Image (cartoon, grey):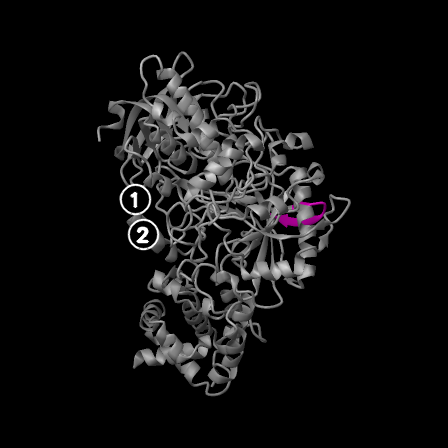
Amino acid sequence: MLVDHFIAISAELTGFSAEELRATGMAGVYRAVVLERAGAERLGRLEAAVTGAGDGPLGLDEEPERELARAVAHLWYLGTWPGLRVPEDSKAQRLAGEPFVVSSRAYTEGLAWRTFHGNAPGTAAQGHGSWSTAPPAGATRDADAAAPAERR
Amino acid sequence: MSAPEARRWDVIVVGAGFAGSLVAGQLGERGWRVLVLEAGHGAPDAQQGHLDALESYRSAMAKVPNSPYATSGAAPSPDVTDLSGNTDGGFDAGGYFVQRGPLPYASGYLRANGGTGLAWTGLAPRMHPEDFRAGDFGHGRNWPIGYQDLEPYYRAAEREIGVAGDVDEQREAVGLPFPDGYRYPMQAIPRSYLDRVMAQALDGRPVQDPATDGPTRLRVATTPHARNGLPNPAPGAGQPAGGRLCQGHASCVPICPSQAKYTPLRTQARWGPSVTLVTRAVVTRVRIAGNGRAAGVEYQTYHEDAATPAAVSTHSADADLVVLATHAIENAKLLLASGAANSSDQVGRNLMDHPVLLTWGLMPHRIGPYRGPGSTSGLEGFRFGAARARRAPFRIEIGNWGWTWALGPPDGRVAELLRSGGPDGRGLFGAELRRTLGDRIGREFAFQFEMEQDADPANRVTIDPRQRDALGNPRPVLHYDLSDHVKRGIAAAKSVSDQLFALLGAEDHTRFEPGPAWPGYFEYEGRPYAYRGAGHGAGTHVMGDSPATSVVDQWQRCWDHPNLYTVGCGSMPTVATSNPSLTMAALALRSSDEIHRDLLARRRPVSVRGAAGVADPALQGADRP
């Protein structure tokens, strides 16, 4: 249930549907990373800002929310936690600043590659000579189609 | 196994990388007892080592060439991340190298079992016949041998490491002579879709190289690879060298998941029982006896990653013949630390690399980057001809992996759009983010211009007693710069690039500016440029026809010590424009024959061992090229 919340805002932030995000198998892991690095309160504020925005533009006027929104999208797109700016005096928050690759699986599931129907280097056997063919014909079309379908 | 120092060896090979593994295999095959000492780590189980390396690569923040492999402070490896450019020009160098030149030596290497041959890109083009006589064009040196001397060994190397290529195309597009009927062991690796789009736009079109009078006609030609393609059905082509068919994982550098790319571990798997490998054995000195002969080596062993003196023990081993095969820079360092082979004062000098000019942009339509090997085709017309007297020659690789080498993987583009994309410049999210990334990354491509660097004695490796690593061994101190000849080549390459972008109708995003990402930034004739290092260190124990002016003879045997060979790219008088590993392999096979003859000559009065090797018909052919 709580993961569903996280997936819902992740879909808004990434432009990938909830089904596509769920299929990566990474939602629970990523939510745990965000909770650990940014805290439940900050994630809650981000969820409120994004879900409260309705049909309008994402409610990310406040910089702390926007920074976390970028981090969540970054996580999904690359499998890497990018780190957050940490207040100088905040010892407890130091953890948040450290960038790291969540796991080799997370790297493999990065959405950045999927935006052009590719694969993260070193993760997919694509068949001998597969690189000679034109990229998938639907690549341009379905990325364009995603615009109206998913932004609501 | 008895302790390596408890017995006398026929041959000690220092370094279990590309050249060392080949030499050890060739000599072991002929029955010689060979001790191989490797400074870096080796996995007890090769397959598990491969899986561990894959996992390390996929979870590494910076997926640089050394990232999959276990390294040690006891035998440090220089890494490309050691360098950083300054915003006002110039550079900072951390890590293993001490850099004192005006420009950085911008390549790393890997000290591990298999060496840099684990992370290499796997391209295996031959050198052009002209490349052996660069001195005739007024820049650099001539080799003591020519293409025809090496040709049989090119064939032997192509069989040994398993090369896929198209002989006819190499003959026509590069002008390489091959014996009639010769076929590479495997069919050419298929060209990428990007190559096909380029060929359509570029083949037959003229570009004007500023160094030539007439235009150069373009032709996109496939590149020979040391990775598995389909077996060549032509007669006499030989069999694939093992491993699986290339699956297009797009990560040849730094690791091929399907093990379709040749690595020295493949040769090691074929080593006979007379070859003994010891890893974590750092050779510190070649012992030279009073008669000028190499008596053996001294080495340190260390425990795992503990680089503390307590975990280190010292050893000595004796042999009839010693082969140094530790990479161009390490070989020079070791000779200098041993006070060996330097009557010519050329040890460590003539350090060369391939300075690489990168240009990058977006094709008009999606071309499916980040698929297949890093480069499957090139433009070969700038590698030879009279123009090389006026500017450094260069080879153009078409880059299949987007902007990775120029700007890093797509991570940076994602972060930038999130940070400052969108109409308000405060970041792009949602469907627009997805669409924009797909459109841009899906059109990324690059050109990689590999420049020949001329041998300059001022570019050199030295050692300094104040600069030592954790085990107290000298760190390489480098002085490196680019000559005006190279800079003219880079300027010509940029001009060619501009014309290629115009012919392709591509958006040029090339931009060089001083800063952390470009330690190799420089200005030439008022224009900004930058280069990266191709990892092709060469020249530091240069081969020649006179002991007065070179370190090794045509067999890579030190002029000063008749039983000390120093092998690898360090022997090359020219680094030429082709990726040098195939040439290094051909030279290693050629030297192995000579080493075998040396060992036989030394033993002949008392022993007939090794006679089987002489009867090898393949070798007899190779003996008399």
Q: Secondary structure at mark 1?
A: loop
Mark 2–mark 1 CB contact (< 8 Å): yes
Q: Is residue A35 left or right of residue B506?
A: left
Q: Chain of mark 2?
A: B
Q: Chain of mark 1?
A: B
Magenta range is B523-531
Q: Which mark is residue B52?
A: 2
Looking at the image, residue A103 lies above or below residue B295: below
Residue B530 counted in the magenta span: yes
Q: Which residue is mark 1?
A: B43
> Is residue A78 visible to the viewer in this orientation of the structure?
yes
The answer to which image quadrant residue B388 occupies is: top right
Q: Secondary structure at mark 2?
A: helix
The quadrant of the image that shows the N terminus of chain B is top left
Residue at 27% in and 43% down: B44
Percent x, y of residue A21: 38, 75
Residue A75 counted in the magenta span: no
Q: Which mark is residue B470?
A: none
Percent x, y of residue B361: 61, 60
> Is residue B77 visible to the viewer in this orientation of the structure?
no
Choose between B1 and A77: the one closer to the eye: B1
Main secondary structure of the magenta stretch: strand
Q: Amino acid at mark 2?
A: Asp
